[in-house]
Amino acid sequence: MSKQAGSHRPRRIIFLLIVVLIMSGAYAAWGLYTINKWDEVGTGSVAEASFHGFLLDPPEKAPGIELIDQYRNPFLLTEHEGDLVVIFFGYTNCPDVCPATLVYYTQVKRELGPLAERVKFVFVSVDP
């Protein structure tokens, strides 16, 4: 690799970290809002909660993301083509939003029934 190509790597990493932090903050705010709305709905089904987001129609192909899983094996997003992958960015020691969101996803998965096999819920830790 040339020195010029390698010199952009720190900038790319910093840019990606900033994007992840912004996305995590926005998602945490959305999670708090959604959880509050979920409390207003009550203990009914997830389908009763109103949708807060946007729909990509037609859907766009996700980029080829490569992560490391909890067993230190590669996780390739491209290996899950055809499935719906829900990615949540959070902290492993998060005291409020992260556990509440994971409980919400557990409820979603339960209500999907057999369709849940086609949905992958992925938690990405942004811990330092």
Image: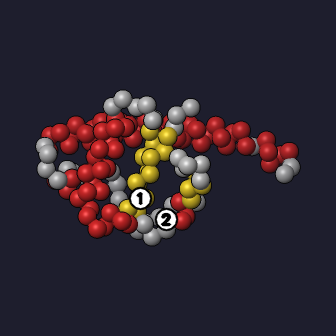
Q: How many numbered badges does the structure rendering display?
A: 2
Residue that appears at 17% across and 53% down:
45
Q: Residues within 10 Å of mark 1 (few under 14, many from 20)?
A: some
Return the disc, 1 or 2, that comes first in the chain's sequence.
2
From this view, report whether residue 122 is shown above or below residue 112: above
Mark 2, secondary structure of its residue: helix
Residue that label 2 marks: 80
Picture coordinates of residue 57, whole percent (x, y): 38, 66
> Residue furthest toward the front?
71
Quadrant hosting residue 8: top right
Residue that appears at 30% across and 36% down:
32
Residue that appears at 53% across and 60% down:
77
From this view, report whether residue 68 is shown above or below residue 125: below
Direction from residue 40 to residue 54 in the image, left or right: right
At label 2, the amino acid type is His
At label 1, the amino acid type is Lys
Q: Does the CB distance between marks 1 and 2 fall below 8 Å?
A: yes
Q: Is residue 63 visible?
A: no
Residue that label 1 marks: 120
Picture coordinates of residue 114, whole percent (x, y): 28, 68
